[in-house]
Amino acid sequence: MRLNIVCAAALLTLLGLVAAAALGVGALVVFVAVAAVVTGVGWVRLQGLTAARAHSVVIAVVGIVSVLTAARLPGAFLTWTGLIAAVGVIAVFLIELVRGTGAERRLESLVASSSGVVLTALGSGWVGSLRVATDAHVALIGTTAVAAMVAVVMAAVPWPDRVIDPLCVLVATAVAPLLALLLHEPSAGVATVLGAVAGLVVATFRRMVLADGGPRTRLGAVAVGVGPVLAAGSAVYGAQLLLAA
């Protein structure tokens, strides 16, 4: 079942991010760059789109450039992320222009590739998050990651959406404050909110994955698991900045 592939890919990506972050910024940069390449290869194959190779290159390159920029520039680490993503979307438009007006599925290719560009660009948030991390922030990242892992495991259960979706949110919401109490950071209230958000994101993507019958290829299933986890990095980075303010 391809849902299991999606959940396994998301779970392994979360575990890989935690392990790479423990090793340092350099390891995290390499891991996020590799994850961007994996997302680029699989994302445009979700619907069997044409011109997949060119779009895959754009998605992967945007992710790599974005994460390298976040790792090398001082100060606001995601300052250039929006511009890099915009250049990637322009490149996607140019690819479709070159294909010509008679090419098949141009609109689907444009939408799918543009969304993939945004996902990989947002992956730089994981590097920015680690660069500004304090002890409290590390606990914040760990708590959010564990809550998301628990929700992903729950999402792999082949039960109806009306049962699994609320369970994803409830389980993640329950686990996060318990872990926060063990780590003494962040506060139980903050952890509860982060757990609820993590569970809601997992439940939402589960519903989206199954809405159209699920990914049609294994590579597409892997990309659906990896891409949203990458994009969550910018949300974690933003939460850190809010806590630090």
Image (cartoon, rainbow, N blue to C red):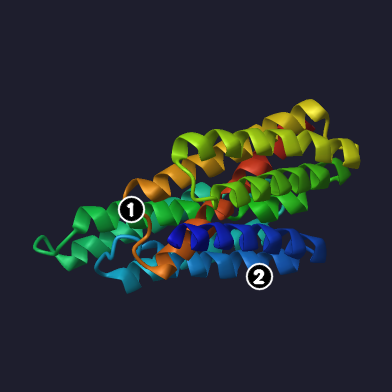
Does residue 187 appear anywhere in the picture?
Answer: yes
User: In the image, which disc is placed on residue 30?
Assistant: 2
Q: Quick check: 244 above or below 206?
A: above
Residue 236 lies left or right of residue 120; in this view the side is right
Question: Which is more toward the observer, 68 or 174?
Answer: 174
Q: Which residue is drawn at 81% across and 29% down?
A: 188
Question: Which is more toward the observer, 235 or 62?
Answer: 235
Residue 207 picture location, percent across and down: 43, 43
Q: Quick check: 235 above or below 189?
A: below
Q: Quick check: 69 above or below 139?
A: below
Q: Upstream in the sequence, badge 1 or badge 2?
A: 2
User: In the image, which disc is placed on residue 213?
Assistant: 1
Residue 95 picture location, percent across and down: 27, 64
Report the amino acid beneath label 2.
Answer: Val
Q: Residues within 10 Å of mark 2 (few under 14, many from 20)?
A: some
Residue 179 lies left or right of residue 152; in this view the side is right
Q: Quick check: 6 above or below 162?
A: below
Residue 112 lies left or right of residue 4; in this view the side is left
Q: Residues within 10 Å of mark 1 (few under 14, many from 20)?
A: few
Report the amino acid beneath label 1.
Answer: Gly
Mark 1 → mark 2, Cα distance in angstroms: 33 Å
